[in-house]
Image (cartoon, helix red, strand yellow):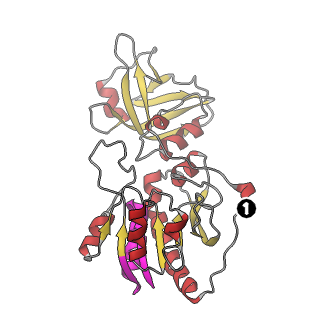
């Protein structure tokens, strides 16, 4: 089949590489425009080799429209004369006319067990809500967000210490395997689709920087889920408040919820170079953190350079 790949980031890369090695005719890559560091429109997705770099290494045409739904972009997609659009974490919703530009429309590789977590950040929200498993769903695309009929679905476990950054490449590899399984059935016209149950729909909205602020009034297990969910972006953070000092912004990378103890939200306890912070109904031991302007370090190294008295608190700025 003549295929056009559309996607960005670590999640999409395994699918792109699998298609290039599959024997199908991949005729172009459509990906997001290059952005300057700090540009508010810049993608927040992880990148490994880079979609553009993978394409250029294969002498494959690369197109980076600001919007895929303009008349110019529609004409571009029509010019590919593709049988199918393969989409993974592209970051734009495709209009009906764009989908219709390929003979079989488009399929989307989505990183959740649809209909759970429709939207831009399904991996992060699955961890945030404490789910024990997640997965990948291949859908036949419609203009509605992640609402298409399901062609395949597979699940994997979320490990206790998984961050979103850990989980994304594993899901990307799973998605690539599933796409290669679906394509022959689509080509033969034997693919069977399952309609999503609307009553089970939940949302996975785009992440913002503000979502990284840790809320210590939540249960300790929920705070730990938040810390894992928002790595590598937007980064879980809070502020250390001490008497006579400006609030210190701190990123927290690793922590462990403690059972059988009661803590006041945001309270700080230091015990033999170990750092504990109170949450609702419990404590978390902070294992790895990064003060603003400093390197990433373990708690013992942080405590060697920072004396925390009984008045110290973690909280908002």
Q: Residue at x 29, y 75 (%)?
A: 60
Whether the magenta-drawn stretch holds residue 22 is answered as yes
Residue 161, how many percent across, how many down? 49, 50
> Quick check: 52 above or below 129?
below
- The x, y position of residue 21, in whole percent, is 37, 82
* Residue furthest top in the image: 244
Please identify the quadrant where the C terminus is shown.
top left
Task: Say whether residue 97 is visible.
Answer: yes
Element type at mark 1: loop
Whether the magenta-drawn stretch holds residue 7 is answered as yes
**The magenta stretch spans which residues?**
1-27
Q: What residue sits right under mark 1 in the picture?
A: 197
Q: Is residue 146 left or right of residue 66?
A: right
Q: Residue at x 42, y 80 (%)?
A: 81
Give x and y (percent) for residue 158.
Answer: 55, 57
Label 1: how many Cα within 10 Å (few below 14, some 14–19, many 20+)? few
């Amino acid at each position: 089949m003549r295929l056009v790949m559309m996607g960005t980031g670590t999640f999409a890369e395994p699918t792109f590489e699998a298609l290039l090695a599959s024997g199908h005719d991949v005729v172009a890559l459509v990906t997001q425009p290059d952005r300057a560091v700090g540009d508010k429109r810049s993608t927040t997705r992880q990148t490994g080799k880079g979609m553009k770099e993978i394409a250029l290494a294969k002498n494959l045409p690369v197109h980076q429209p600001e919007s895929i739904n303009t008349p110019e972009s529609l004409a571009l997609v029509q010019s590919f004369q593709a049988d199918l659009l393969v989409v993974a974490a592209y970051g734009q919703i495709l209009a009906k006319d764009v989908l219709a530009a390929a003979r079989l429309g488009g399929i989307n590789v989505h990183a959740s067990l649809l209909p759970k977590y429709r939207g831009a950040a399904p991996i992060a929200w699955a961890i945030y809500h404490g789910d024990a498993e997640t997965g990948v769903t291949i859908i036949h695309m419609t203009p509605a967000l992640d609402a298409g009929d399901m062609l395949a679905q597979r699940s994997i476990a979320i490990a206790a210490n998984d961050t979103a950054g850990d989980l994304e490449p594993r899901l990307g590899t799973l998605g690539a395997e599933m796409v290669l399984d679906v394509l022959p059935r689509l080509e033969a016209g034997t693919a069977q689709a399952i309609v999503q149950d609307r009553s089970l729909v939940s949302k996975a909205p785009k992440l913002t920087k503000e979502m990284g602020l840790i809320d210590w009034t939540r249960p300790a297990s929920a705070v730990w889920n938040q810390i894992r969910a928002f790595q590598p972006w937007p980064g879980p953070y809070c502020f250390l408040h001490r008497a006579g000092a400006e609030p210190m912004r701190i990123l927290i990378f690793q922590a462990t919820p403690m059972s059988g103890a009661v803590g006041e939200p945001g309270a700080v306890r230091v015990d033999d170079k170990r750092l504990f912070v109170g949450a609702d109904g419990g404590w978390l031991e902070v294992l790895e953190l990064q003060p603003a302007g400093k390197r990433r370090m373990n708690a013992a190294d942080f405590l060697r350079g920072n004396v925390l008295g009984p008045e110290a608190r973690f909280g908002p700025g």
